[in-house]
């Protein structure tokens, strides 16, 4: 039996775009895309939530932004070059290109264990602190076992403390933490000392 969504939590974040699926780029159970509203700034590694279908009303699918692409109606870069008077950087283009930025998102979780592809044209928002915790599985860790492990700060200013389950760090379940990163910068060592 699937978990029931937390319908008492109403998203407070504004809509930043709508989910989008095309013939060549369909949404899947593992990933979805959405186009951004103009002037919206999203960065890779931001956590977003998309409205999703559910048996007892809408649910929320959470995901991590993995890529951002700006596409236009220009068939090639050469078209853009020609539209600017054959490469004049001072010229106004003969054809104003229509374009949008599309974010690609890796699905992390759903608040009701619904792992269907996100349908097209549903609202997408930045996750709030509670949403980040749901996305990362923090809500599944009993409060007495939560070990603060860092801080997530997203491009819209939302912050959330990230927790590890201390039973897997110090106790009978695993007793280790895997830390990866670039060699030679001492960031992994510093983080291990922080823990």
Image (tube, rainbow, N blue to C red):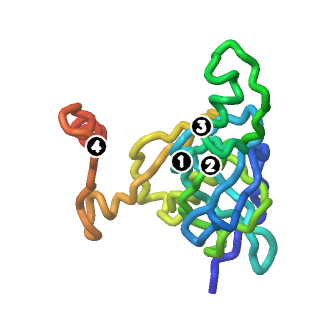
Q: Nearer the viewer, mark 1 or mark 3?
A: 3
**Element class at badge 2:** strand
According to the picture, the residue beneath numbered tag 3 turns out to be: 77
Q: CA distance from mark 4 to mark 3?
A: 35 Å
Q: CA distance from mark 1 to mark 2?
A: 6 Å
User: Taking 181 as reference, is 91 left or right?
Assistant: right
Near mark 4 (Cα within 10 A), the count class, few <14, some 14-19 or many ≥20, is: few
Near mark 2 (Cα within 10 A), the count class, few <14, some 14-19 or many ≥20, is: many
Near mark 1 (Cα within 10 A), the count class, few <14, some 14-19 or many ≥20, is: some
Q: Quadrant of residue 183?
A: top left
Residue in the image at 65% along x and 48% along y: 102
According to the picture, the residue beneath numbered tag 2 turns out to be: 103
According to the picture, the residue beneath numbered tag 1 turns out to be: 67
Q: Are marks 1 and 2 in contact (CB under 8 Å)?
A: yes
Q: Which mark is residue 181?
A: 4
Residue 116 image offset from top left, x and y in percent: 65, 75
- Residue furthest left in the image: 184
Front position in the image: 184 or 96: 96
């Amino acid at each position: 039996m699937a978990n029931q969504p937390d319908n008492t939590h109403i998203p407070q974040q504004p809509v930043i775009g709508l989910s989008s699926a095309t013939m060549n780029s369909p949404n899947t159970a593992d990933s979805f895309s959405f186009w951004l509203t103009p002037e919206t700034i999203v960065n890779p590694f931001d956590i977003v939530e998309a409205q999703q279908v559910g048996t007892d009303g809408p649910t929320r699918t959470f995901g991590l932004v993995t890529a951002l692409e700006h596409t236009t109606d220009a068939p090639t870069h050469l078209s853009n070059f020609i539209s600017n008077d054959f490469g004049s950087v001072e010229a106004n283009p003969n054809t104003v290109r229509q374009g949008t930025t599309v974010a690609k998102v890796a699905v992390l979780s759903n608040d009701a264990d619904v792992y269907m592809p996100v349908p097209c044209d549903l609202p997408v928002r930045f996750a709030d602190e509670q949403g980040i915790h749901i996305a990362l599985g923090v809500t599944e860790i009993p409060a007495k076992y939560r070990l603060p492990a860092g801080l997530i700060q997203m491009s819209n200013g939302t912050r959330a403390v990230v927790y590890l389950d201390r039973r897997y760090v110090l106790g009978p379940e695993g007793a280790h933490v895997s830390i990866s990163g670039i060699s030679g910068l001492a960031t992994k060592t510093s983080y291990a000392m922080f823990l």
